[in-house]
Amino acid sequence: MKIHEYQAKELLAAEGAAVPPGKVVKSVEEALAAFDSFGGSAVVLKAQVHAGGRGKGTFIGSGADFGGVKYLTSREKVGSVAKTMLAFPLQTKQTGPEGQKVSTLLVQKAADIAKEYYLGMVLDRASGLPVMMASSEGGVDIEEVAAHSPEKILKEPVSPELGLAPFQARKLAFELGFKGDQVTQAEGIMRALSKVFLAKDCSIAEINPLVVTKEGCVEALDAKMVFDENALFRHPEIAELRDETEEDPAELRAARSGLSFVRMDGSIGCLVNGAGLAMSTMDIIKYHGGEPANFLDVGGGASKDQVTEAFRILLSDSRVKAVLVNIFGGIMKCDTIAQAILAAFKEVGFHVPLVVRLEGTNVEAGRNLLADSGLDIVTASGMADAAQKVVDAARKKN
């Protein structure tokens, strides 16, 4: 689960990290009032969306020459820029071509930046430990630094039980080139980031940029956090930060029904039981020249209602030209899933070809149910056969 920048900085501030003053607004009038509250000094107006690359983004259809992060010095400019940000979708590398509607802005007092750094924490799956990463090359091009100059990324393993130790934070601070009081300030922010990451079950937590101002203060200027959804039951205070307007409606709908669903850009809908089989299904569809429209795992014990809702979600996507059901019957027997497919087929009403591949327990009984149904369902004897049939069917619908 993602949260907004301002929410991430609130979590950091609660652990003692220094963050610049800012006000969250949802209208042009509130943005102007926030500017006035800072005494008319320079501010940075920041669109709050769950996507990176905001500063280099564009507002679709606006004709504006600025992205989702804009430095402003006048009340007039704050009003006009806020109006554009709230009226047009912001497109970045992470939003897709349709962009993302902006409903919230952060008016942040501008910092006089002398130097930018990067801080981040992720789980290093090779070592099985969280890792604090840091670089003296922070800012909007940190991805380029990681890709082309990985030696500039410092790494420090972190104990899940003890967190980032003071000596580790000081070591990173010195290696980054902090001096004097800046070392203590940077250490405090690093430890705050570590505390939030571990205590709140983050999957990623970043401060980019971490800055030193010309007055010598170290501040977390921007922050990003993503949380493990499987751990949200432990953190109701984090679950309350969820902004459903930032999420795909189909993915939210699937989650409410206990389905694992991720929308993609292809034309072949996939309904599969098991994450590994779902990944393999998408791979073999691509191998045969098709493009999957989604990842959808109904799990090992899907009910008729879940299968029906899964079909509704798949068919609500106008890009879907054919659907592949790929089921391996283990805990759920193939005849049971066949009955659920038939019931869902009749209830939902298919307008695209449906290809079904069944294997596992009671597979013959399941196949016979489909064959005897009289419904327009194409059966397949293996994954390759199923993939080829659904790709061919999708092409004929185009």
Image: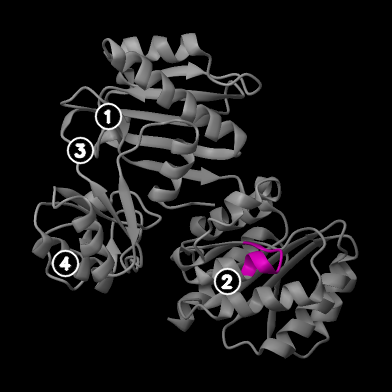
Q: CA distance from mark 4 to mark 1?
A: 35 Å
Give the CA distance from mark 4 to mark 2: 52 Å
Q: Which residue is mark 2?
A: 390
Q: Amino acid at mark 3?
A: Ala
- Residue 274 lies, with reference to residue 368, above or below; the image says above
Q: Which residues are magenta?
A: 254-260
Earlier in the chain: of badge 3 and badge 2, it is: 3
CA distance for labels 3 and 2: 56 Å
Contact between marks 3 and 2 (CB within 8 A): the answer is no
278 part of magenta stretch:
no
Which residue is at a point 69% across and 82% down the rendered structure image? 377
Q: Nearer the viewer, residue 90 or 278?
A: 90
- Frontmost of labels 3 and 2 is 3
**Regarding mark 2 in the picture, which secondary structure is present there?**
helix
Between residue 245 and residue 299, name the one nearer to us. 245
- CA–CA distance between discs 1 and 3? 24 Å
Quarter residue 128 falls in: top right
Position in image of residue 37 (x %, y %): 23, 54
Please tell me how crowded label 3 is: few (under 14), some (14-19), or many (20+) other residues with Cα within 10 Å. some
Q: Disc 1 marks which residue? A: 145
- Asked if residue 257 lies in the magenta stretch, the reply is yes
Q: Nearer the viewer, mark 1 or mark 3?
A: 3
Q: Which residue is mark 4?
A: 79
Q: Position of residue 323 (x, y in %)?
A: 60, 74
Q: CA distance from mark 3 to mark 4?
A: 20 Å
Q: Earlier in the sequence, mark 1 or mark 3?
A: 3
Mark 3, residue position: 111
Upstream in sequence: badge 4 or badge 1: 4
Residue 197 versus residue 113: which sits nearer the camera? 113
Task: Mark 4 or mark 2: name the one nearer the start of the chain.
Answer: 4
